[in-house]
Amino acid sequence: MPESPTLTAGIHYENAANGSLIVHLSGYWQTGSAIPDIHTHVAELTRRQPRALKIKVTVTTWDSRLPCFLFKLLEFTGRKGIDTELDELPDSLRALLQLALTVPERSDAQRVSLPESTPAKIGRFVVDFANHTAEFVQFIGELMLAAAAAFGGKARFRWLDVLIAIQDAGPGALPIVGLISLLVGLILAFVGAVQLALFGAQIYIADLVALGTVREMGTLMTAVIMSGRTGAAYAAQLGMMKVNSEIDALRTMGLSPIEFLIFPRMLGLILMMPLLCLYADLMGIIGGAIVSLAIFDIAPAQYYYEIRKAVQLDDLAIGLFKGLVFAALIASAGCMRGMRCENSAAGVGDAATAAVVDSIIYIVVADSVITLLCNQLGI
């Protein structure tokens, strides 16, 4: 029986005005056809060196071989800077080529990355810091508006959520706050006793422990504990709500996430933080008493009398004021990180970690500023 004729794909060139070149593609560009070798025609174009290229397609039938050939041809003209006109291509073929040429480079492609210069690192840090500061200021502004609406009786939230936040931030934190504060009191007493014993002034251990705990260490250690316990929990809870689209559902129902979710948590932590600070002060003083009474034979009455002489109401008020400020900063950092969480499980973990880091930074900065102000005011 006679053999079927071989299907061929044709291509020929035609010189045009102003040094441009017309490329005609015809014939059968499909499986089983004799497709021209792209390297041969790339060499031909290199030899002719046209200023511009115009492609005309009058093929009978075609499949993926035609766009593959044209794609390689356009890659070559793009590298050489040759202006290529595709107006006379079929609409479907032209759209396919344009889509292929606009697809971004694969992310796993091997590339050599140059080290970032020091000015670029500084600039990127400044930009990130400015963006973070702007987001924090915006978040605080929205939170203040929510607080004003709440005190005006217009905010929409559940008091049950406030009670739950009080339970989590208050009684639930007593064991860890008590243990850490007791140990900090013991450490302060031991550190002070080493130097005071050189002068026979062990009685002043009570002054050191009481003042250090009430003005500084009790509030600071409580804030650090709450940043790792409650601040991270707030970030994780809100992050999971964002991943599960619960926050978007609240907005769809016309409820503000700031009022409904964040304000009850912040209110619960602010209400409990001063009480936790008082509890931490008591446990720290008890820790100092254990060292003073057991090792240095100081009478309980003497220890109590020295504490009454050393600690004034101003000292206690400063510690409680710091606790209120720290509570607001911890809740703000945790809730803001939760609201900015990425929609993934890894994003929830990153948000919790970032909340703890931000909280500790805010606490240290705020504590330094308040201490400097108190020193300048003489209180």
Image (cartoon, rainbow, N blue to C red):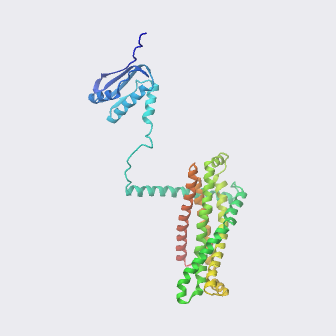
In this picture, residue 71 sits left or right of residue 180: left
- Residue at the bottom extreme, as displayed: 200
Q: Quadrant of the N terminus?
A: top left
Q: Tell me which residue sits at (38%, 31%) in the image.
A: 72
Which quadrant of the figure has residue 351?
Answer: bottom right
Please give left or right for residue 257 compared with residue 106 in the image: right
Q: Is residue 73 above or below residue 183?
A: above
Quadrant of the drawing holding the C terminus: bottom right
Tell me the residue at 57%/78% (across/down).
Answer: 188
Question: Which picture quadrant has residue 144?
Answer: bottom right
Q: Residue furthest right?
A: 160
Residue 329 placement (x, y as % from top left)? 58, 63
What residue is rendered at 30% in x and 28% in y?
45
With respect to residue 201, does 239 lie above or below? above
Tell me where residue 186 appears, x and y as whole percent: 60, 77
Classify residue 60 by image quadrant: top left
Q: Is residue 224 left or right of residue 28?
A: right
- Seen from the viewer's position, the closer of residues 190 and 352 is 190
In the figure, is residue 279 to the left or right of 349?
Answer: right
**Image coords of residue 89 (percent x, y):** 41, 24
- Residue 207 shows up from this direction: yes
From the top left corner, tell me how far across and down residue 289 is, in percent.
Answer: 64, 81
Query: Which residue is pictured at 41% across the width and 12% down the height?
Result: 3
